[in-house]
Amino acid sequence: MTLPSVCNCERTWWENLGPHIVLEQRAGSHKITFIVEQTRKGCVHACSVDDVCQLLSHVPASDLEALDTMVMRQSTRKQELVNPAWGRLAYSANIGRPGKKTIRSGPAVFLEAKDPTEVWKWAQNLRPEEALELNRLRSDGHRVEDTGKHFVFHSNSESIRATQLYRTLLHELGHWVDWLERVVRPAREDSALYEVLSDRYFSRPHLEREAFAHQYADRLREHLKAKGQIPFEKLSRGPAQRDKILNPAQKSKIRSQF
């Protein structure tokens, strides 16, 4: 099964937007543009804009360097089937409506809308990294049923929020910090190094890059827990803040999950 592309559009499928709103918000001193897509029936954005800002306000400012776009995305059913994910990092994205001009470009973190009632399963012959992920999901509050042949996962809005806010978001930031340290900052002194360092970065084994991101997320999460900064109750955006929407024509067309 393949995902369709739009004619005359060079974007990756997850850079294409459906109905959405755009918000500008601050996480501490860091200005962030949020693009929030309309959810399909049964799906929610488990993390609010304010949740993400609250968490990012506790992240070292240097780790957010040049990262100023967050996309709360809604996959199609086909995309979710072919490429299921809690979220992803785009090192360089061109985000916009299919066949239309780009509205944001540059690095971005994407968090996916999810159906809290969805049940999914894994075969029991797990690879080591999958066994670790199963334990992480349990700790996030997902109920895991062992049927003898499969692990069956039962989620809810709270467990999805815990996964995306305290793990996925920090994990993707870990990838970004890895990129900053290995490519962006060294290339400042010699711009000719950029392509060489970029190729070297992506030639590293996938598991090595994942290990760095997991270690970053684990270390920062434990630090924030020790300081009492996480976990925190879900934060909701009120009517006054909704007036900050930059494209108000969308207000009547979208049900936002703030």
Image (cartoon, rainbow, N blue to C red):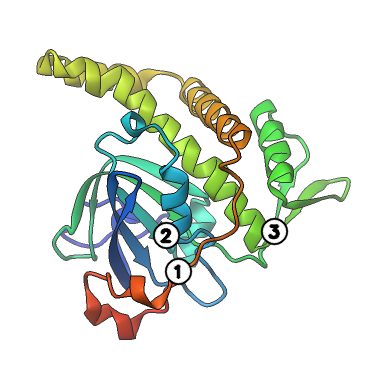
**Residue that numbered label 3 is attached to:** 155
Q: Establish if 6 lies above or below 58.
A: below
Check residue 32 in the rendering and tell me which mark sits there, or answer none: none
Q: Nearer the viewer, residue 174 or 121?
A: 174
Find the distance from the CA under tag 1 to the CA under tag 3: 20 Å
Q: Residue at x 43, y 64 (%)?
A: 74
Q: Earlier in the sequence, mark 2 or mark 1?
A: 2
Residue drawn at 33 percent across, 36 percent down: 64
Number of the label disc, if any, that sits on residue 49: 2
Q: In the displayed structure, does residue 187 sit left or right of residue 160?
A: left
Residue 229 showing in the rendered view: yes
User: Which residue is outermost to the right?
Assistant: 148
The amino acid beneath tag 2 is Val
Q: The residue tagged with tag 1: helix, strand or loop? A: loop
Q: Are marks 2 and 3 in contact (CB under 8 Å)?
A: no
Q: Classify residue 35 by image quadrant.
A: bottom left
Quadrant holding the C terminus: bottom left
Q: Position of residue 119 (x, y in %)?
A: 70, 61
Q: Which residue is mark 1?
A: 258
The 10 Å Cα crowd at callout 2, few under 14, some 14 to 19, many 20 or more, is many
Q: Residues within 10 Å of mark 3 (few under 14, many from 20)?
A: many
Q: First in sequence: mark 1 or mark 3?
A: 3
- How many angstroms separate mark 2 from mark 3 (CA)? 21 Å
Mark 2–mark 1 Cα distance, whole angstroms, equals 6 Å
